[in-house]
Amino acid sequence: MDAYVAIEGGHVIEARGRAPGTTNGELVFTTAYTGYEESLTDPSYEEQILTFAYPLIGNYGVREERFESDRVHPNAAVARELTDDVAEWLTEEGVPAVDQIDTRDLVTDVREDGAMACGIAVGDDVTPEDALAELEDCTAMSDHTDIGAQVSVDEVEVTEGDADGETVALIDCGAKQAIVDSLNERGATVHRMPYDTTPAEVEAVDPDVLFVSNGPGDPANFDAAVDVVDAFVGDVPVAGICLGQQIVARALGGTTEKMAFGHRGVNQPVQDVDSGKVVMTTQNHGYTVADAPEALEVSQINVNDGTPEGLDSDDLDVITRQYHPEANPGPNDSLSFFDDVLGMAEAKRTVLAD
Ligand SMILES: NC(=O)CC[C@H](N)C(=O)O
């Protein structure tokens, strides 16, 4: 199958077609060397074209148990070499894929010029012009103003924990399954609620903790979730992961901005400000908190570029992380985040009961 990849500026690269179709999206890369099933099903990659920096993708097959949602989210996949298993999976999913392309070159372009528009055409009769036409049609990430609707649940889904466990209202802005599982495994009952849930609907659940999930796109396009955090913060403990951190920051008066090419991989070093301890983390984000709200302490920072990785407040009962403590893929070193969140909720519940 023929394949052409057109990148911002109009440069067209020839590749080998592995799954047919034409599409466009924001070109990003991940340096993760494993976890392609988790990454390809992570809703945070919605409307993006995912390039794998690691050259061989697919060498341990495709297993549904490792999926983070019920479909592939990037608009296309790009790798140096994709196995037949992955090519067949992406073909079934209708997601175009290419390989036999110099991903070192592509990653260097994105590192130098930032995440960029990209058009892809794959098929027996496609031409470079088809890829260029897709590039021309590409919508900037911040202009996907209702991207939450593409990835959230339509209705509340409840997964039960232990009878005496905490009740979590999870605002699903494109949540990874591992977040729900990590909470359930610790005895919490999770009410997974649509991204545009109102404060009144959250109130009806009477949560012990309000948890804002990861998700795709620009945090500026999640005003409903910002309103929910605004309504509860200070009264109910609040937690957030990735987009969740950005939304919590916005709700308390902080600002967010787009990074050049973001952080995507499984070995991003994060330092705890108080202890000095460094952990390796899984990341997948293109935006960051620019000005942290005064009410929150920047508790953790990225060792490479100093961006905020954790925002905490003991007074308000807030804990958020820019990275992914739930891993999947990646190191499990930060799973204790979920113990901290539920511990915070339990402590507050005890205080209120006394
Ligand atoms: N994984 C995420 O939640 C990503 C958050 C946001 N979409 C960003 O790119 O920064």
Image: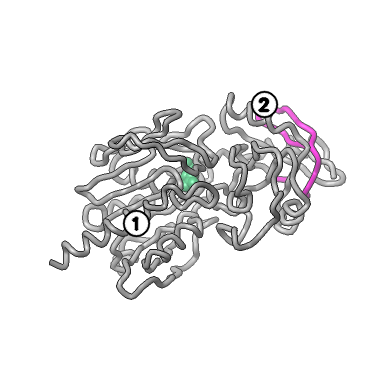
Q: Nearer the viewer, mark 2 or mark 1?
A: 1
Secondary element type, mark 2: loop
> In percent of the image, x 33 and y 67: which residue is there?
167
Query: Which numbered disc flags the more N-terminal residue, 2 or 1?
Result: 2
Question: What secondary structure do most residues of the magenta stretch adopt?
Answer: strand
Q: For residue 220, say whether it is visible.
A: no
Residue 171: percent from the left, percent from the top?
40, 58
The one nearer the camera, 311 or 291, is: 311
Pinpoint residue 348: horizontal percent, then vertical percent: 21, 60
Q: Residue furthest right?
A: 125
Q: Residues within 10 Å of mark 2 (few under 14, many from 20)?
A: few
* Residue type, label 1: Asp
Residue where numbered disc 1 is placed: 339
Residue 10's x, y, as percent?
71, 28
Judge the density around disc 1: few (<14), some (14-19), many (≥20) Cα neighbours within 10 Å.
some
Question: Looking at the image, which residue sits at the far left?
Answer: 354
Amino acid at the residue labelled 2: Gly
Bounds of the magenta span?
Answer: 4-23
Is 88 or 9 nearer to us in this picture?
88
Q: Residue at x 37, y 55 (%)?
A: 338
- Residue at (50, 47) in percent of width and height: 331
Query: Which percent across, then down, holds residue 267?
Result: 51, 38
Which residue does the numbered mark 2 point to in the structure image? 9
In the rendered image, which quarter contains the N terminus? top right
